[in-house]
Image (cartoon, rainbow, N blue to C red):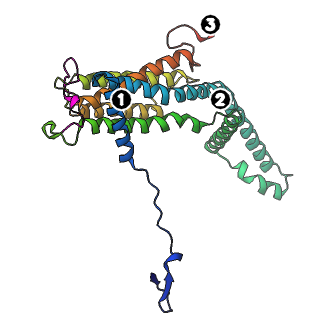
């Protein structure tokens, strides 16, 4: 089979299809992954004999313990090492700034000296005309370069801080889709949703006997919001403790912006959980609770703090 191409000033020329660019598509079938998790959950439920209200949090804790907890420990050790190197990087900044300021002052002196050759003046002109803001910018760039080299030398590069989210977020998405698939949540109207496993209708407990519909008393959204907020505040308190210097009270930074975004996302999740099936919200609560406990344990076993006070009181210099 042939296809034709047209070139300006020439006739149509048939081009064999074998020379055409191949249409290659590389994609991951997320439906197949979700279906695999769904069938695995149903098989586990049938084999274990556990009710859904217990199986969902137990499976969540097991998956997080095997999948994300080891990565969290590795990442925390990396952050610990980075924290021990940060004072070196912080000490470099004023030294680099002072050295650059000396070079600028020397260049200005040469520019003003009558005996200086014109070629030397021309060579020193860019340095002599450098402003204070340019000195700050160049010294900051050099500090970041030195930090990158130092972290690479000790094998604790910044990009390794994103290993945990890279594996944790896909797991959270797949598990959320699996819970939605199991409970048959396809619309906001619970009467039209049909759970894949009928046992979800009766294997709840307490006030949420039916896991295929939303919590009728809206207690789950409140629990989810409280645990998620505690998790966010704990995490950003940890980041605050790892600061080397006292932050300015009324000057927001990137950490504040991320923290505010995380708090707003909690409100968004609470709004969705009002209409989501109890099985899905139960998974979200279990995952957030595991994250909170994990962060607490890591802060005790692998603390990262350079401020005078530690999280649980006492002076860090006591050790």
Mark 3 to mark 2: distance in Å? 23 Å
Q: Is residue 57 left or right of residue 254?
A: left
Mark toward the viewer: 2 or 1? 1
The residue that disc 2 covers is 90
Q: Quadrant of the C terminus?
A: top right
Mark toward the viewer: 3 or 1? 1
The residue that disc 3 covers is 318
On screen, 285 above or below 187?
above
The magenta span reads 194-210
Mark toward the start of the polypeptide (3 vs 2): 2
The residue that disc 1 covers is 44
Q: Secondary structure at mark 1?
A: helix
**Res 307 quadrant in image:** top right
User: Residue at (62%, 43%) from the top-left corner?
Assistant: 137
* Residue 281 percent location from the top left of the image: 28, 29
For the residue carrying disc 1, how many other residues have a C-alpha within 10 Å: few (<14), some (14-19), or many (20+)?
some
Pick the front one: 198 or 142: 198
* Residue 292 percent location from the top left of the image: 42, 21
User: Residue at (59%, 36%) from the top-left corner?
Assistant: 158
For the residue carrying disc 3, how many other residues have a C-alpha within 10 Å: few (<14), some (14-19), or many (20+)?
few
User: Residue at (35%, 47%) from the top-left corner?
Assistant: 31
On screen, 141 above or below 116?
above
For the residue carrying disc 2, how many other residues have a C-alpha within 10 Å: few (<14), some (14-19), or many (20+)?
some
Q: Is residue 228 left or right of residue 182?
A: right
**Residue 228 seen in render:** no
């Amino acid at each position: 089979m042939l296809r034709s191409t047209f070139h300006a000033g020439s006739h149509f020329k048939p081009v064999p299809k074998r020379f055409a660019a191949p249409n290659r598509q590389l994609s991951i079938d997320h439906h197949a992954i979700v279906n695999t998790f769904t069938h695995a959950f149903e098989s586990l439920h049938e084999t274990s004999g556990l009710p859904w209200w217990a199986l969902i949090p137990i499976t969540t804790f097991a998956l997080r313990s095997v999948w994300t907890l080891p990565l969290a420990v590795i990442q925390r050790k990396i952050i610990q090492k980075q924290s021990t190197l940060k004072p070196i990087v912080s000490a470099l900044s004023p030294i680099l700034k002072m050295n650059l300021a000396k070079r600028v002052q020397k260049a200005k002196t040469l520019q003003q000296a009558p005996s200086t050759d014109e070629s030397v003046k021309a060579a020193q002109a860019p340095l002599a005309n450098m402003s204070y803001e340019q000195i700050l910018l160049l010294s900051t760039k050099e500090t970041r370069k030195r930090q990158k080299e130092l972290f690479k030398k000790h094998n604790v590069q910044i990009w390794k801080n994103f290993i945990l989210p890279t594996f944790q977020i896909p797991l959270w998405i797949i598990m959320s889709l699996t819970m939605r698939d199991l409970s048959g949540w396809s619309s906001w109207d619970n009467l039209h949703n049909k759970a894949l496993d009928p046992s979800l209708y009766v294997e709840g407990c307490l006030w949420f006997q039916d896991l295929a519909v939303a919590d009728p008393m809206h207690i789950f959204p409140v629990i989810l919001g409280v645990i998620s907020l505690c998790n966010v505040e704990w995490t950003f308190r940890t980041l605050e403790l790892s600061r080397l210097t006292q932050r300015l009270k009324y000057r927001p930074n990137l950490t504040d912006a991320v923290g505010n975004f995380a708090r707003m996302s909690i409100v968004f999740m609470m709004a969705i959980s009002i209409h989501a099936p109890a099985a899905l919200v139960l998974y979200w609560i279990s995952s957030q609770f595991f994250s909170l406990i994990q962060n607490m344990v890591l802060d005790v076993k692998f603390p990262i703090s350079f401020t005078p006070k530690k999280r649980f009181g006492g002076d860090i210099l006591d050790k």
